[in-house]
Amino acid sequence: MQRRQLFRLLGSLSLALAIGSLGTMGAHAADKPLKVGVRGGVDEEIWEVVTKVAKSRGLNVETVVITGTASPNEALNNGDLDANSFQHIPFLRDQVKQRGYKIVSVGDTLISPIAFYSKKYKSLEALPTGAKIGLPNDPSNQTRALVILRDHGLIKLRDGFDPYTGTATLADVTANPRKLEFIESASVVLARSLPDVDASAIVNSFAYQAGLIATRDGIAVEKRENNPYVNIIAVREKDKNAPWVAPLVKAYQSDEVRKFIETKYQGSVVPAF
């Protein structure tokens, strides 16, 4: 074979391999980065590692930190994001039910335990009659907080309640012997106003931003065993079989990310893969 023919053959093979690579990763690998919405703190730090792993595998990922009351699900549903990674399945289920989002889960990430924190008391059992208790105002995280209170004997919830299949609100509290006063608010507000109440249930992402770690600072932490609140990566329903989805999930569910989570957070968040 002549040298010119050999070069042409090698060039054709290289082009074929490049096209095959793009077919695996999708247009984002060569065109524009995948935009993944996350909350600040834990998720932002973890996704810094995920983006490095993804890049080493040929997938270009850009994280977009969603702050305040802005909704990562709204941004995803509208097409401003390609994926998001900040929520657990019950939260997504409620959002889909309430807002009609066409969003689905494509992979598990971690369990981020919710906990009660207090500047005044060392345990839930030490709370006095009439104590002011902060609760998240979204259905899924309020459910998690009420389950903790139930498991510690401070309240009772209606018969037949199951967190795997539904949510609980204050209307489902059937007994409150200590006459606890519940104050419902957004999680970001609960984290900032902890000194103003006797205790507050704060989701881990906002607690972490406030310098709080569930296993170190929480006066009561939800159980990790049989926990339905596994965090996920979500995409639009129409994208669930897109060629970039599996590589994105695999980049998160990698040994590098697992090691980072276990080393960095020392059990305050736990890999779910």
Image (spheres, helix red, strand yellow):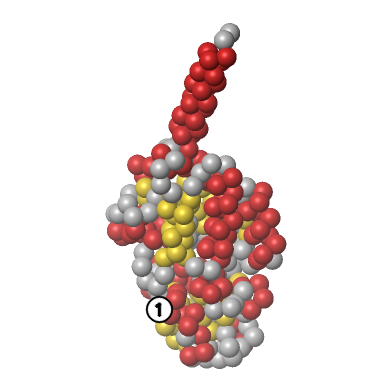
Residue 241's place in the image compared with 96, above or below, is: above
Q: Is residue 28 visible?
A: yes
Residue 253's place in the image compared with 171, above or below, is: above
The residue positioned farthest toward the top in the image shown: 1
Quarter-of-image position of residue 210? bottom right
121 or 5: nearer the eye?
A: 5
Q: x, y percentage for residue 36?
A: 44, 54
Rendered residue at 50%/40% (across/down) = 246
Residue 156's place in the image compared with 193, above or below, is: above
In the rendered structure, the answer to whether residue 223 lies left or right of residue 86 reads right
Query: Which quadrant is home to the N terminus?
Result: top right
41 or 219: nearer the eye?
A: 41
In the rendered structure, the answer to whether residue 220 lies left or right of residue 139 reads right
Rendered residue at 39%/61% (across/down) = 72
Rendered residue at 45%/32% (across/down) = 23
Q: x, y percentage for residue 103?
A: 37, 50
Task: Tell me the kind of residue under disc 1.
Answer: Ser
Quarter-of-image position of residue 6? top right
In the rendered structure, the answer to whether residue 49 lies left or right of residue 97 reads right
Q: Label 1: which residue?
A: 185
Q: x, y percentage for residue 226?
A: 60, 57
Pointer 1 local density, CA inside 10 Å: few below 14, some 14–19, many at least 20: some
In the rendered structure, the answer to whether residue 163 lies left or right of residue 124 reads left
Q: Secondary structure at mark 1?
A: strand
